[in-house]
Image (cartoon, rainbow, N blue to C red):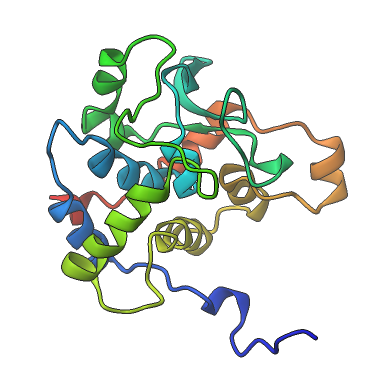
Amino acid sequence: MNIKQHRRPDEERKAYDLQDLRAISRNLPKDSSKPEKLYVPMICMLSGMRLDEACQLYREDIIQVDGLWCFDVNDCKDKKLKNLSSKRMVPVHPYLIELGFLGYVELCQEGSRLWGNLKRCKVNGYSNSLGKWYQRFNRKHVTDDPLKTFHSLRHTFADTLKQLGVQGNLISELMGHANSNITTGRYGKRYQSKVLFEVIQKIDYTATMV
């Protein structure tokens, strides 16, 4: 038997609003011994990546493509992806570079994971402990709305681009969703990094991060 759904898919979780994003960015800890608590939420806010995708990153997953820094989202080594469409390149947002992310990456050893504090568990991969921490952080500093969770960062990313009029297939590629359009999905190749970077740049929450 199927359980009847009482909400549309877009209502199962809420997107964060600008006030929420301001609370997140202002209250994220800047403790250099726990860099994942600053960078992982900001990466997901500015790239649309899933929590586990950001938590399992290795140093070599931050690469330059056509002169642009990108996240290489893949299932190499002990990483896992939700589906085949999840394998993709996502340009690094300029604000992450301004925040010092590339400098942090340079400090990591070759072949190492970016977030040494996160330990892999069988069920949730590397995201288990950070996900639990964020739940507490979210309720303390951001909102008591049960429909606003870490995944709301992904909803906000998608909705922001949608409201800016960005083509759906561009949003899908950035977020690792399958493109159901046979012309652009089956016959069209992946978008070039420079095209995706132009879209990423449209995400501008700068005013909320001051």
User: In the image, what residue occupies the spot 22% across and 31% down?
Assistant: 98
User: In the image, what residue occupies the spot 29% across and 14% down?
Assistant: 106
* Residue closest to the eye, 170 or 132: 132
* Residue closest to the eye, 131 or 95: 131
Q: Position of residue 189 (x, y in %)?
A: 76, 31
Q: Is residue 6 visible?
A: yes
Along the horizontal axis of the image, is 104 left or right of 121? Answer: left
Question: Looking at the image, which residue sits at the far top?
Answer: 110
Along the horizontal axis of the image, is 58 left or right of 73? Answer: left
Q: Position of residue 190 (x, y in %)?
A: 70, 32
Q: Is residue 203 visible?
A: no
User: In the image, what residue occupies the spot 14% across and 55% down?
Assistant: 27
Q: Position of residue 159 (x, y in %)?
A: 48, 63
Q: Position of residue 201 (x, y in %)?
A: 40, 40
User: In which quadrant will I find the N terminus?
Assistant: bottom right
Along the horizontal axis of the image, is 197 left or right of 37? Answer: right
User: In the image, what residue occupies the spot 25% across and 73% down?
Assistant: 143
* Residue closest to the eye, 199 or 177: 177
